[in-house]
Amino acid sequence: MTESLFCGVNDPADASNLTDMEKKHVPVIEAPDTVTAGEAFEVTIKVGSMPHVMEEAHHIQWIDLYSGSNFITKVILTPVFMIAKATINMVKSGAHETTTLRAVIRCNVHGMWECEKVITVK
């Protein structure tokens, strides 16, 4: 029996060889590799390396962003009127030398997907 796409967060079967469905759902975090403590920087989360549809019947409902275990924000997306992408302005303190940004998205048809990106804080 195949596990449901709605049982937790989905992971690609082979991260180095994504299927077309995975390419449309695994989020992509665009952020600097290194940031300066106390200075603003942009983080853009795109849903998929291939564009995801935003139709009434099939769309991305939301994008969550975390820094380490800290919740940063939730962006609610409206089908038809929005694209599956969000840009957030952040500031990191110098308390840690690195942090892991984690994006989690939810597709109304294919469930939740996530990705991570480690950044250095100077």
Image (spheres, rainbow, N blue to C red):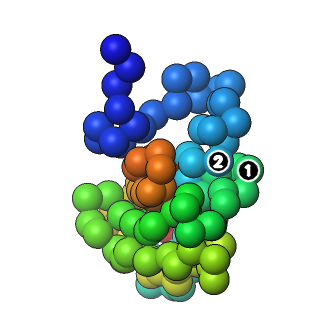
Label 1: which residue?
50
**Is residue 2 shown above or below 21?**
above
**Label 2, label 1: how far apart the Cα atoms are:** 5 Å
Q: Residue 34: give its label.
A: none
Find the residue positioned furthest to the left: 69
Number of marks in the image? 2
**For residue 65, which quarter of the picture?**
bottom left
Camera-side residue: 52 or 33? 52
Q: Tags 2 and 1 in contact by the CB under 8 Å rule?
A: yes
Camera-side residue: 122 or 119? 119
Residue at x 60% of width, y 38% of height: 22
Residue at x 59% of width, y 29% of height: 15
Camera-side residue: 36 or 62? 62
Camera-side residue: 46 or 68? 46
Residue 120, position as x, y percentages in the image? 50, 58
Q: Residue 24: give its label.
A: 2
**Mark 1 secondary-structure assignment:** loop
Question: Which amino acid lies under the numbered mark 1 shown in the image of this protein?
Answer: Met
Image position of 28 (left or right of 95): right
Residue at x 57% of width, y 74% of height: 79
Question: Which amino acid lies under the numbered mark 2 shown in the image of this protein?
Answer: Lys
| Classed neighbour count for the residue bearing mark 1: other residues with Cα under 10 Å, few (<14), some (14–19), many (≥20) | some
Residue 118, position as x, y percentages in the image? 49, 51
- Residue 42 in sight here: no
Residue 72, position as x, y percentages in the image? 35, 74
Find the residue positioned furthest to the top: 1
Image position of 43 (left or right of 6): right
Quarter occupied by the N terminus: top left
